[in-house]
Image: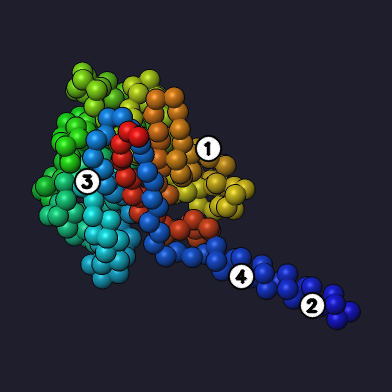
């Protein structure tokens, strides 16, 4: 009887610890390294997606400190930075801070469209000295490397993304250049692969909300349904790499995130030269 009680108590304690650990919502910096023959000197990119107007301390100091520590050369914003029925703050002040300190690019997510204020949000981003990509490609030099940054509006809500994708492709340079595509939704990956972007950055899936590390990468994601293939992480294809952010939203969720901490994504581009 005593042995049975001890076993039951140990199992209950272990289960409790497992559950509590799974509900950890502390900000995580997820780091990736990508090697390429098109890169000579390292480039540090920070990718931000699905903030949904959440708070990270007063004036976002927690998020700002995490970004500053990475010393990014470039910040890319993948949509759903704002929220549907909420004021533009505090996301707006965070956007203005990014524009004041870093070179940055932005594409819309579905929640910008759901708000019916998408034009106002785009204008705020542009006024913050951040470039909004809508079927555009911008060719820039970072640390001696040429980068082609392309971006499209939310691929479902905008109803124009096939044309924007073609337009962005037409603006890419003919000479070999490391190319990046910003698209809020990862579920359209099969449409993107023929264009052979080196790096595709998405979000939207919120990490599948619930995870069991090593067993289940995500339980449900909008646009993908149950057990989504692209809930979060890195996915390799013949000519492209897809990185899906698990997003920064953790407040006012329909269900708490489980083993799915909100994440800031760091991507370091490095040379593959021996």
State the residue position of label 1.
Answer: 229
Count neighbours of disc 2 (C-alpha within 10 A) and say few if under 14, some if 14 to 19, many if 20 or more: few
- The residue at the point 40 percent across, 59 percent down is 28
Q: Position of residue 171 (x, y in %)?
A: 19, 23
State the residue position of label 4.
Answer: 17
Residue 161, image quadrant: top left
Distance from label 4 to label 2 (Cα)? 16 Å
- The residue at the point 46 percent across, 36 percent down is 235
User: Above or below — where is 142 with respect to 15?
Assistant: above
Q: Position of residue 236 (x, y in %)?
A: 45, 32
State the residue position of label 2.
Answer: 6
In terms of sequence position, does the residue under pointer 4 or pointer 1 come before the other? 4
Image quadrant occupied by the N terminus: bottom right
Count neighbours of disc 3 (C-alpha within 10 A) and say few if under 14, some if 14 to 19, many if 20 or more: some
Depth order, front residue of 58/193: 193
State the residue position of label 3.
Answer: 74
In terms of sequence position, does the residue under pointer 2 or pointer 3 come before the other? 2
In terms of sequence position, does the residue under pointer 1 or pointer 3 come before the other? 3
Distance from label 3 to label 4 (Cα)? 39 Å
At numbered mark 2, what does the secondary structure look like: helix, strand or loop?
A: helix
At numbered mark 3, what does the secondary structure look like: helix, strand or loop?
A: strand
């Amino acid at each position: 009887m005593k042995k049975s009680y001890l076993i039951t108590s140990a199992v209950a304690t272990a289960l409790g610890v497992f559950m509590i650990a799974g509900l950890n919502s502390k900000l995580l910096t997820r780091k990736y390294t990508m090697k390429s023959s098109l890169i000579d000197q390292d480039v540090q990119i920070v990718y931000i997606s699905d903030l949904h107007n959440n708070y990270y301390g007063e004036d976002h100091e927690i998020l700002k400190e995490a970004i500053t520590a990475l010393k990014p050369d470039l910040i890319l914003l993948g949509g759903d930075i704002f929220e549907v029925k909420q004021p533009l703050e505090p996301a707006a002040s965070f956007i203005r801070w990014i524009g004041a300190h870093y070179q940055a690019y932005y594409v819309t997510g579905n929640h910008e469209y759901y708000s019916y204020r998408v034009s106002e949000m785009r204008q705020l981003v542009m006024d913050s000295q951040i470039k909004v990509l809508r079927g555009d490609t911008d060719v820039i030099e970072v640390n001696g490397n040429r980068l082609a940054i392309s971006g499209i509006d939310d691929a479902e809500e905008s109803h124009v993304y096939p044309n924007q994708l073609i337009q962005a492709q037409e603006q890419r340079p003919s000479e070999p250049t490391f190319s990046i595509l910003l698209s809020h939704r990862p579920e359209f990956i099969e449409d993107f692969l023929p264009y052979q972007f080196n790096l595709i950055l998405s979000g939207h899936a919120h990490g599948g909300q619930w995870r069991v590390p090593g067993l289940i990468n995500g339980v449900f994601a909008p646009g993908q349904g149950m057990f989504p293939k692209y809930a979060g992480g890195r996915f390799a294809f013949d000519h492209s790499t897809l990185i899906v952010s698990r997003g920064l939203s953790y407040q006012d969720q329909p269900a708490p995130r489980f083993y799915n901490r909100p994440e800031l994504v760091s991507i370091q581009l490095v040379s593959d030269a021996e």
